[in-house]
Amino acid sequence: MKLKFLELREDYAKILFEDVKPYFVNAIRRTMIADVPKLAIENVIIYDNTSALFDEIIAHRLGMIPLPTHLDILKDCEDCKIHYTLSKEGECTVYSGDLKAEDPIWNVKDKNIPIVRLLKNQRLILEAEAILGTGKEHAKWQSVVGIGYKYYPEIEIDMDKCDLCHDCIRQCPKNILSIKRNKLVVNNMEECSLCKACEEVCTKNAIVVKGNENKIIMQYETDGSLTAKEILKEALEILYKKYDELEKALGL
Ligand code: SF4
Ligand code: SF4
């Protein structure tokens, strides 16, 4: 298997897998969703809440706030708990940035997630405890977002049949077809969504769209708790361990 980052940012990755089977890429995807651990608030002690929201709603909102997850520190300490405090009085909006961690390295990165609006003299005072968990237990422990993959597009154009009518160009939702030097060309193959709209509109059967099952493009975002690269690395390590255990269990 070959792997290449087509795009890589802290919170986004687009990866090209080559010489691979779809079920293996799907196993990576599922591991990223369900098995990669991250921090999330699990226990909340509310000392005072005179806002318009019930304690349970506040606790649920706190649970969904992405927390920085330093796996290098947390992995050797499965029972680690990270403590946060919050104390605000209205009139104001309480944001994720109002959660104060015991050590600043755990402070929330996205400080502008609204939790509740406090009117004059309303108060919210609480303590929260975050623990490691995985997406298979609850979505709040899922660090990967909007993950998906597609087969690498392959578009064949038969210029002997094509009369340059432009129908497919008009139909393509990705705007990647054009005519250059009297030839129909694909400008950015990777952008093709394999929707086959071009193929369906062509009355001359001059264009055929296929997906290469052994060459796959995967893309995903993160919620900010881990970087895109960390999530992939972690998922591959988890999968490796699982295959290793299976191999041993089978006595291979
Ligand atoms: S619709 Fe068919 S014939 Fe028309 S430009 Fe596209 S490929 Fe050529
Ligand atoms: S399959 Fe869809 S996205 Fe791809 S070239 Fe054809 S119309 Fe455009």
Image: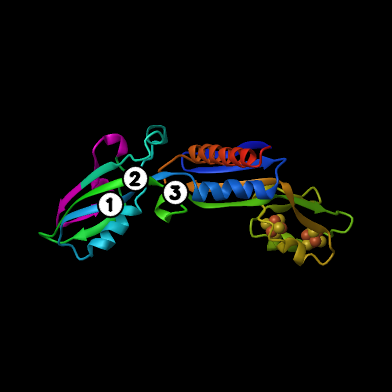
Q: Position of residue 111 (x, y in %)?
A: 30, 46
The Cα atoms of the two marked residues, 3 and 1, are separated by 16 Å
Nearest the eye: 99 or 47: 47
Q: Report the span colored magenta.
A: 86-106
Q: Quadrant of the C terminus?
A: top right
The disc labelled 2 sits on which kind of residue? Ile
Secondary structure under tag 3 reads loop
Secondary structure under tag 2 reads strand
The Cα atoms of the two marked residues, 3 and 2, are separated by 10 Å
Q: Which mark is residue 43?
A: 1
Earlier-in-chain disc, 3 versus 1:
1
The Cα atoms of the two marked residues, 2 and 1, are separated by 9 Å
Q: Position of residue 237 (x, y in %)?
A: 54, 37
Mark 3: few/some/many CA within 10 Å (<14, 14-19, 20+): many
Asked if residue 44 can be seen in this view, the reply is yes
Residue identifier under label 2: 131
The disc labelled 1 sits on which kind of residue? Asn
| Figure label count | 3
Residue identifier under label 3: 134
